[in-house]
Image (tube, coloured by chain):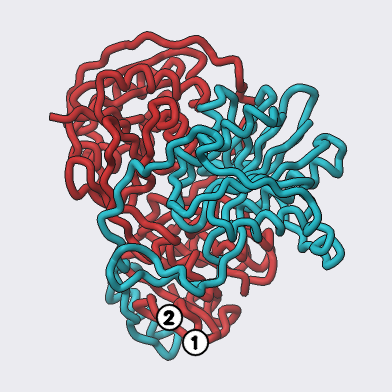
Amino acid sequence: MKALVCVKRVIDYNVKPRVKADGTGVDLANVKMSMNPFDEIAVEEAIRLKEKGVVTEIVAVSVGPQKAQETLRTALAMGADRAILVMTDDTVEPLAVAKIIAAIAGEEAPGLIITGKQAIDDDSNQVGQMVAALLGRPQGTFANEVTVEGDSIVVKRDIDGGLETVKLALPAIVTVDLRINEPRYASLPNIMKAKSKPLANKTPADYGVDTAPRLKTLKVSEPPVRSAGIKVPDVATLVAKLKEMGVVA
Amino acid sequence: MSKTLVLVEHDNASVKDATLAVVTAAAMIGEVTALVAGSACDAAAAAAAQIEGVAHVLKADDAAYAHALAENVAPLVAGLMADYDAFVVPATTTGKNIAPRVAALLDVMQVSDILSVEGPKTFTRPIYAGNAIATVESSDAKMVITVRGTAFAKANAAGGSASIEAVGVHADSGLSTFVGSEIAKSERPELTSAKIIVSGGRALKDAETFASVITPLADKLGAGIGASRAAVDAGYVPNDYQVGQTGKIVAPQVYIAVGISGAIQHLAGMKDSKTIIAINKDEDAPIFQVADIGLVGDLFTVVPELTGSL
């Protein structure tokens, strides 16, 4: 079974984003960019399924600028077999990304589409569910554990208050949560090897997808700032403060 | 006037708290119709009809909706949306699972996790883990919106008297089946509705230490227990304890952060708490920049002492 893994190039997890002074967005110039951490987990899960003999080929897909190629090379270095970059410099909203992924799925006919549950830049948490809707296939969101059983996949999901297990008919879409695995680091030989793995360059037009945004960003601002309060020297003072606030009797 | 359809989160018998804040948000957009999709869900529909601000209740009662499977609920909602301008759901795991599926069926770009309603189609929402707030305007004819519960007041759960109408149901999609669930049974308040939360970080060392340090303090205060992503990743506590960008967003009266350095992803989940108390041995930890009261010290001596003196 073929697996399609969708990855996004985003601001690095450890970088604190700065809002542009003119309020048009977040400053991404000269900022370290990396693969969305959840997508890294998705790539890892696909590789583990390949190591188990369930998945035969892993195709990594990214929609984004030319530089998203680096993100795809990372996926290839981790263990994906080939990659497709759908290149655009425009901001592409989750709905348009989902349409592109659905169109690629139409060509590639994967048994499984895996992606992160959300990207840490726009925090939308939409693409996987939308792809599933567009393809009329089931979705296992916020996956904590997946097991392929014949023509179905059993997905244990992280939900509010605990875990839920669902069984989905393949082909299916899975979005992964944090705890499903810990992604590997690509080894130097694999990074070298990844450079010669196939990477196809496409555009949204190749898939007939209109990426014009549906949401207009009117402004981007700093969140309200919380100022630091006081420091107390010891537990007794802390308890006194808590009593003063009425937290404890 | 615009008409909104609110997805009621329920367990077939009662309505979950998360729904109440969504009713408040939806009422700012238009008239509120509450959808109760479930199985043998008369009691939940009756409870939804009592929520102040709900004008109508639609009840879709079928075995297919028993576990809120997105594959079954989304087509139901997409069909009903012919009569509504906005579908509004809580940004809970249930809502986040279903809403984008509905949005794609309607060919609409969803507005996720709104913090405020600024106009008929204009909302604010957090991006980059709450490090920036975007004001966005939808250009779609219909809207699909998920609502951050802590950002809106809860509608009164009693006082309403909406009519309840049964709606036609769709057949089971046959795409997915519910196998089972493991819901942690706890006497402790749920994180998203707790008045006080005690949260632990990586400094708690391991699961046993986390339990022996954090639990007694939480017990004394009748508090919910949370954790940083680092503590969850290290396996000290289950994932649903996680507070932060990728976990739960909380805004209790008092948030006590123990051994949590205050990574931006964690702050994103708790910085709207009314009072933040931080205990950390590193006086330069970023958590102190948002804490109302900070105590620099070794949590292994400070927390037991605190627990003992309450």
Question: Label 1 vs label 2: CA separation?
Answer: 7 Å
Q: Are marks 1 and 2 in contact (CB under 8 Å)?
A: yes
Q: Chain of mark 2?
A: B
Q: Which residue is mark 2?
A: B288
* Percent coordinates x, y for residue A83 in the rendering: 70, 47
Task: Pick whichever, B175 or B59, lies toward us.
Answer: B175
Which residue lies at the image location 53% right of the left edge and 43% below the top edge? Answer: A161
Q: Which chain is red?
A: B
Please, is residue A110 above or below residue B21 in the view? above
Please, is residue A149 above or below residue B58 in the view? below
Q: Amino acid at mark 2?
A: Phe
Task: Pick whichever, A107 or B209, lies toward us.
Answer: A107
Q: Chain of mark 1?
A: B
Which residue lies at the image location 79% right of the left edge and 46% below the top edge? Answer: A81
**Mark 2 residue element:** helix
> Dividing the image into 4 quarters, which one contains the C terminus of chain A?
bottom left
Residue B256 in view: no
Q: Which chain is cyan?
A: A
Q: Which residue is mark 1?
A: B284
Q: Amino acid at mark 1?
A: Asp
* Percent coordinates x, y for residue B175 in the rendering: 61, 19
Please, is residue B285 above or below residue A146 in the view? below
* Percent coordinates x, y for residue A214 in the rendering: 34, 41
Which residue lies at the image location 82% right of the left edge and 41% below the top edge? Answer: A50
Residue B9 in view: yes
- Dot 1, crowdedness within 10 Å: few (<14), some or many (≥20)? few
Q: How many marks?
A: 2
Q: In this view, which residue lies farthest toward the left?
A: B1
Instruction: Quadrant for residue B24, please give it.
Output: top left
